[in-house]
Image (tube, rainbow, N blue to C red):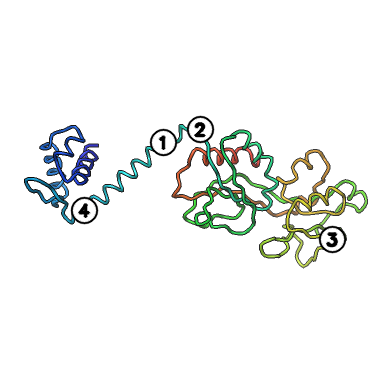
Amino acid sequence: MENLGALGAFVQAADARSFTVAGRRLGVSSSAVGKTIARLEGRLGVRLFHRSTRTVTLTPEGALFLERCRRIFCEIEAAELELAQTREAPRGKLRVSLPLVGMLMMPTLSAFMRAYPDIELDLDFTDRLVDVIDEGFDCVVRSAVATDSRLMTRAVGTFRHRIVGSSAYFAARGMPRRPRDLKVHACLQHRYATNGKLEAWPLRQLRNIDLPMTAVANTVEPLIYMVEQGLGIACLPDFAIRHQLDVGTLISVLDDYVDHEGTFRLLWPSSRHLSPKLRAFVDFMVENLLPA
């Protein structure tokens, strides 16, 4: 703290170009300011000011040191502001990018909006790889592994894929017992919107088996609807069909052959402190998005 006091006296004297004015601002005498600056110069081993009977001016070393001191005090001010904000109610706009499957996260997002009515959500649903910082997002939700060192990350929870169909469909077509049985079933498949490729069903023993394509969609919601209508079977993330599985409208098959587990993550710029609104969003999503 004594060192910070000396830096403060130096900055005040540099701004005022006067030990007298600096002392007046700090509530001490001009001689006290002069002695503090002299001790600081002695510790640094450089002269910070050219002194005359009427004014003081910065030396080149003093000008360089002043710039660094300003950064230090700006960081202190930012830290104080950050701590002060933690006591404030979360509010303001929060810009969030989510994958297309994020439409199925709307119940959780709606619950967040009810819990924090002063936060304005600006939601962008896309499967493309967004640049979190350059595009100005406060936070993104993704299942990919974070590789950008500029980002902080926190895992929300894990999910698995399930092969599902309706009871009416299985009553009519029978249940597949092994992956190769899928060759005679109506398979409803997902195509990635970003590259046009079909999403592979993560089943062991499925090599060299071309699944039928009864229907293809580039979002998950139509596939869920078609499965519920008994039009076929689909490979879907379990969080998207948790309710249907719980009430029995959809039935999971081939669970022992499924070989996949994914993790949803929240990512945000590491240079950005966790504001009350961002902290509230991160904590809420971690607790509620993929409950056990």
Question: In the image, which is nearer the foreground, mark 2 or mark 1?
Answer: 2
Please report contact status of discs 4 and 2: CB closer than 8 Å, yes or no.
no
> Residue at point 16% right, 33% down?
28
Q: Nearer the viewer, mark 1 or mark 4?
A: 4
Residue furthest to the bottom: 208
Circle 4/circle 3 CB separation < 8 Å? no
Disc nearer the start of the sequence (3/2): 2
Q: Marks 3 and 1: in contact by CB < 8 Å?
A: no
The residue under label 4 is 63
What is the distance, in whole Å, between disc 3 and disc 2 at their CAs?
51 Å
* 53 relative to 70 in the view: left or right: left
User: Which residue is found at the position 18% from the left and 39% from the top?
Assistant: 22
Q: Residues within 10 Å of mark 1 (few under 14, many from 20)?
A: few
Q: Of the residues under marks 4 and 3, which one precedes in the sequence?
A: 4
Specify which label sits upstream in the sequence, 4 or 2: 4
Label 1 amino acid? Leu
**Numbered disc in front, either 4 or 3:** 4
Q: Which secondary structure lies at badge 4?
A: helix
Residue under circle 1? 83
Q: CA distance from mark 4 to mark 3?
A: 73 Å
Determine which residue is flagged by label 3.
214
Judge the density around disc 2: few (<14), some (14-19), many (≥20) Cα neighbours within 10 Å: few
Answer with left or right where residue 116 lies relative to residue 10: right
Which residue has dot 2 on it?
89
